[in-house]
Amino acid sequence: MASQDMGRVAMISGANRGIGNAVARRLHADGYRLSLGVRRPAAFTDRSGLDGGAEVELFAYEAAEPADAQRWVDQTLSRFGRIDVLVNNAGIHRNVTLESGSEDDLDELLAINVKAPFRLIRAALPHLKASGSGRVVNVASMSGKRARNLAVGYQMSKAAMVMLSHAVRRIGWESGIRAVAVCPGYVRTDMAGGPTAPPRDQMTDPDELAGLIATVVGLSNTGSVAELLVNCQYEHML
């Protein structure tokens, strides 16, 4: 096991692009050692912002594969000896409404957006407790807080992520675990779009969002933030 005075270790799923990649680069700059879970490590060729300084390791992680959660946690422990932060960022979008879309699409949404982070948290929980200041970040969505369109399947999955975060806070509180549900609106990534989306230059900058996440992760145990809502548009209900 690594000595407890070594740098803190963060596991980040879906770190190859978008929000996950921005969070990886920010935490790396802050001195975290990184265990990055990506579907195809060989295809992860752009290491901008991840070279030099703290150690970075890539591990194959397929959110749809149940066994991959425990495997990735075990690999992280073998490599770094500890886990201090878990960022559940990997997710998908499928257009499932009450009038369209298949149950197969709904099953896929729930498998990737809900069951996968549930498995990772369950596998990492003993080690986050051992940290004494473990942190869990669930990248949900504003769609988990309200219904502005008909995509109820996606909304259900993200609302479940929010509740999962609260459950982690409850079970891990006495062991120093703090969890936050990050709920952004439109973020300027390759996944953002749609007929109601604002112009890309008006969307939230992923690096700015990553900075907010890093701030929350870095708070002491007495400065817990349960939900972080970040929006590029005005909504009178929130």
Image (cartoon, rainbow, N blue to C red):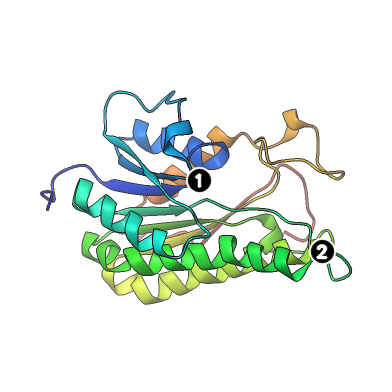
In the rendered image, residue 92, in percent from the top left (x then y), is placed at 64, 53
- Distance, label 2 to label 1, CA atoms, is 25 Å
Image side of residue 184 versus residue 127, left or right: right
Q: How crowded is the residue under tag 2: few (<14 C-alpha within 10 Å), some, or many (20+)? A: some
Choose top left, top right, bottom left or bottom right for residue 73: bottom left
Report whether residue 144 is seen: yes
User: Who is closer to the viewer here, 214 or 53?
Assistant: 53
User: Who is closer to the viewer here, 229 or 99?
Assistant: 99
The first of marks 2 and 1 along the sequence is 1
Which tag is nearer the camera, tag 2 or tag 1?
A: 2
| Image: 195 above or below 107 | above
Residue at position x 46%, y 32% in the image: 44
Residue at position x 13%, y 46% in the image: 5
In the rendered image, residue 91, in percent from the top left (x then y), is placed at 59, 53
| Image: 111 above or below 8 | below
For mark 1, what is the residue?
Answer: 14
What kind of residue is marked 1?
Gly
In the rendered image, residue 194, in percent from the top left (x then y), is placed at 82, 43
In the rendered image, residue 147, in percent from the top left (x then y), is placed at 78, 63
User: Who is closer to the viewer here, 171 or 89?
Assistant: 89
Choose top left, top right, bottom left or bottom right for residue 120: bottom left
Residue 139, label in figure: none
Quadrant for the C terminus in the image: bottom right
For mark 2, what is the residue?
Answer: 101
User: Who is closer to the viewer here, 228 or 75?
Assistant: 75
What kind of residue is marked 2?
Gly
